[in-house]
Amino acid sequence: MSSFLPVDLAHASRLINHGPTVLVTSCSADGSQRNIMAAAWSMPVEISPPRIAVVIDKHTYTRELIHASGSFGICIPGVVSTDFTYAVGSSSGRDTDKFKKYGIVSLPGKELGVPLLEQGCVAWLECRLIPEPHTQDAYDTCFGEVVAAAADSRVFAQGKWMFGPENEDLHTIHHLGRGNFVRAGAIIRARQPE
């Protein structure tokens, strides 16, 4: 039984606003080809409607599939997925199905059909590509409108993250470069200004 619950789209931007490493999933328009890659740079850019930006090199197979299908998934891996996150971010899917190679189980998104991951991940966003013809050939940044989102209720509920010692395997990971990651730590609550 999945512990993932739908996330109100008003809170979808909170799934990535703390800068986690993400997995970008994509598939061809007919669903016959798919790919997964890691991305260190993603962020929310609008809250309503929820829109995000993610940097994906314009010469990659993932980018090719995204432009062909007009959609992509953003999956947020937990600590338990550090090794396969690094693996899928260090190889091309043009010549091999990384889902098969690394034993990654996906489910089709209900809105757009993109591959989404729950096993080893703590949240996902299903995104419709926002075409930017004047920039898509010049820049590596892709923009997407979030059409559905879900998160593991053991670590994200009521629009907020809950990182603590009881769920360390579910903490998000943040890439520091060259295969080094750090996990999100315990939450520190700020005092209200006086």
Image (cartoon, rainbow, N blue to C red):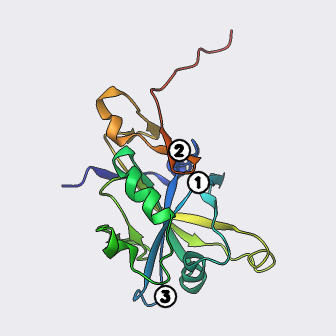
Which residue shows up at 58% across the image and 19% down it? 190
Return the residue at label 3.
29
Q: Quadrant of residue 108?
A: bottom left
**Residue at the outermost left position:** 1
Identify which amino acid the numbered label 1 is placed on.
Ala
Q: Nearer the viewer, residue 4 or 188?
A: 188
Q: Earlier in the sequence, mark 2 or mark 1?
A: 1
Inspect this view and state whether residue 5 appears: yes
Q: Quadrant of residue 191?
A: top right
Spot occupied by residue 94 in the image (x, y as percentages of width and height): 50, 82
How far apart are labels 2 and 3 at the CA level? 31 Å
Q: Earlier in the sequence, mark 2 or mark 3?
A: 3
Q: Nearer the viewer, residue 143 or 145?
A: 143
Spot occupied by residue 67 in the image (x, y as percentages of width and height): 61, 82
Decide: is 138 above or below 158: below
Which residue shows up at 62% across the image and 15% down it? 192
How far apart are labels 3 and 1 at the CA level? 25 Å
Mark 2 or 3, which is nearer the eye? 2
| Quadrant (top left/top right/bottom left/bottom right) for the C terminus | top right
Spot occupied by residue 148 in the image (x, y as percentages of width and height): 46, 62
Q: Earlier in the sequence, mark 3 or mark 1?
A: 3
Spot occupied by residue 140 in the image (x, y as percentages of width and height): 71, 68
Which residue shows up at 46% across the image and 41% down it? 159
| The disc label shown at residue 174, or none | 2
Return the residue at label 1.
40
